[in-house]
Image (tube, grey):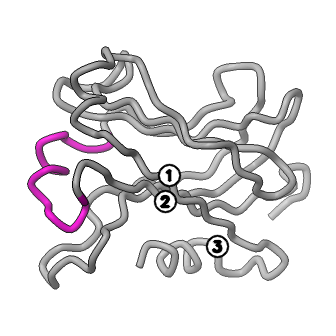
Amino acid sequence: MALACFRAFCAGDPEIVPRHHVFEIKGYRNLLNTLKRNEYVSSETFEAGGYDWRILYFPLGSSSAMSGYSSVYLELMTPGASAWAKFELTVVPYRPPGREACHPFELYSSRVFKHGDASAMCGTHSFFERWKLSALGPYIRGDSFRIECAISVYDYRRPY
């Protein structure tokens, strides 16, 4: 499971408690037909490490995405805040994939987020090729899929 991989990612920091949030994207095919490139849907705001965050999903990709790819980002929403976070964004299956399929849609990152400027968001322009999501049955249920964010927030002023 994605969260198990994330726990290893945060090993060595016992006072840091990973949080996770699942964003279910409903009406996937409709989003592909109604939104334009660089338009997104967002998760509800969730709390981690005393800060507010949200996931942004761009079905047709952000302005910098390669053609045919979707984009995903994590955004710090707390006004005036700065936070250092390690996070993982993963498309999670509704049912366990076969042994041959491991989570093909994952992003790991660590950085300082600063609300109010370009560093408030971190993600990838080319998270996955859209046709691959539809082709991998465990990740789609009806017309929906899920992106999980596992996140740990650190006091970035402290040396680690």
Q: Amino acid at mark 1?
A: Phe
Residue 42 picture location, percent across and down: 53, 35
* Helix, strand or loop under label 2: strand
Q: Reply above or below: 61 against 75.
A: above
Q: Work out whether mark 1 precedes mark 3 in sequence or the reverse, and give the earlier one.
A: 3
The image quarter containing residue 48 is: bottom right
Report whether 9 appears left or right of 30. Answer: right
Q: Gap in Å between the C-alphas at discs 1 and 2?
A: 6 Å
Residue that badge 2 annotates: 148
Residue that badge 1 annotates: 23
Q: Gap in Å between the C-alphas at discs 3 and 2?
A: 16 Å
Q: Gap in Å between the C-alphas at discs 1 and 3?
A: 22 Å
Residue 75 picture location, percent across and down: 63, 36
Q: Nearer the viewer, mark 1 or mark 3?
A: 1
Residue that badge 3 annotates: 10
Q: Quadrant of the N terminus?
A: bottom left
Q: Work out whether mark 1 precedes mark 2 in sequence or the reverse, and give the earlier one.
A: 1
Q: Reply above or below: 147 against 11.
A: above
Q: Residue at x 44, y 52 (%)?
A: 24
Residues in magenta, as a range: 127-141
Residue 25 picture location, percent across and down: 40, 45
Report whether 78 appears left or right of 133. Answer: right
Q: Residue at x 50, y 52 (%)?
A: 23
User: Chief secondary structure of the magenta span?
Assistant: helix
